[in-house]
Image (cartoon, rainbow, N blue to C red):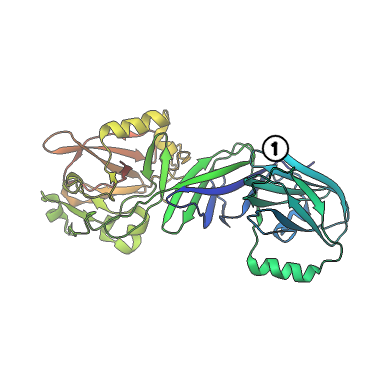
Amino acid sequence: MNAQDYLISFTGTGASTTVNSVIIENLENGTTLTVNGTDVLRLTTPVGIHEALNNTASRIKIYPNPMTEKSTLLISAPTAGDAVISICDITGKVVTRTKCYLENYTREFIVSGLLNGIYIVNVKSNSYQFSGKLISNCKSNSAASIEPGSDNISIEKKLSEFDAKGVQATVDMAYNPGEILKFTGISGDYSTVITDIPSENKPIAFNFMQCTDGDGNNYPVVAIGTQVWMATNLKTTKYNNATCFHVEFDNMTWANLTSPAYCWYNNDAPSNKDIYGALYNAYAVNTGKLCPVGWHVPTNTEWDALLEQLDSNAGGKMKEIGSAHWTYPNVGGTNASGFTALGGGARLLGGVFSDLKMAGYWWSSTEMSPQEYGSRNIVNWDAALFSTPGYKTNGYSVRCLKD
């Protein structure tokens, strides 16, 4: 039995077209893999994987890549025998293929006639299969073809040239159909989160955009429906015009504030800042200057739109899976939305810290009464997204929404 393979490539749009790296997390079993943005991810079921798939990155070299007129393939078959070399577009449609007998040494092939686009080069026999990604900038009207190269090439010289220039690799990841994968694409200061349940060969396109707060912190973003959210909690200590505002440690002083302030859970920045972000009172939210330029604290209506998009078990679809940042049982936690809500707790009446890893609280910018603002919260014992007003003196987390 051959494994069912899905080939996933990565592209960038928006503020950057370059994908430096991609973090892939299997939200069902907790496995994580980091690949280069130019790599092809091959998702393959555990049953039927041949031993020859190990270290497949060394089996095929492609250069130049991207190609303009033609490109050279150096193919090193692990065993001698009949094989099929295919070139498919990103939808899986075969553009051209050739059958040949590959010896147990490196062979050269020349590819030409590919129109502009992203292609997968697949080499398959009865005992092995490996792939590579080829990008074409060619505008030729000639038919796509794969032709044998010279039999007298210096393999060592060719391989050393390719290694010096860097070559795209195909990286394997075990995958059971139906599992949710979280892809985090990184391009310099930009990072974008996408969740997907792959069922075919496809490109993952990351829409990169700037999300930088007054401190210069950069945040990953995630699109959920028509909305774009920050994918982690806000942790700025400055407004978006770079002016500082008040941090308060003392419980009673915090409880009596009527001006903007922030803190860290248990006043422990080293342990909690980068994980859970800051806790802000509603007076800070009311300034309209907390979020990065081009972003804002969502209104009740915008929170309701998120709830409508996620429908039932919205809180579970927003919660990070597992027990790293949620106390057992973390009911319904799948993070299918990519929101990655954490149990960051809150600062409540009397300035007392409470509920770390038990609940997460996020402000709305909608004022409910002279004493309260709207908020949303998620708990470890339920899969719902709750709507509860919060006293303006409470300290809650903030997720910003793109304007």
Q: Position of residue 387 (x, y in %)?
A: 28, 33
The image quadrant of residue 79 is bottom right
Q: In the displayed structure, does residue 314 sit left or right of residue 352?
A: right
Q: In the displayed structure, does residue 219 sit left or right of residue 62?
A: left
Task: Look at the image and tell me whether residue 174 can be seen.
Answer: no
What residue is shown at x 34% (from left), y 53% (from top)?
276
Picture layout, residue 200 above or below residue 291 = above
Q: Position of residue 348 (x, y in %)?
A: 21, 46
Placement of the N terminus among the 4 image quadrants:
top right
Task: Report the number of discs.
Answer: 1
In the image shown, does 122 or 22 lie closer to the viewer? 122
User: For the residue marked with disc 1, what is the amino acid?
Assistant: Lys
Q: Position of residue 210 (x, y in %)?
A: 37, 51
Tag 1 secondary structure: loop
Q: In the displayed structure, does residue 392 sit left or right of residue 133?
A: left
Picture layout, residue 399 above or below residue 63 = above
Q: Mark 1 highlights which residue?
A: 93
What residue is shown at x 88% (from left), y 58% (from top)?
103
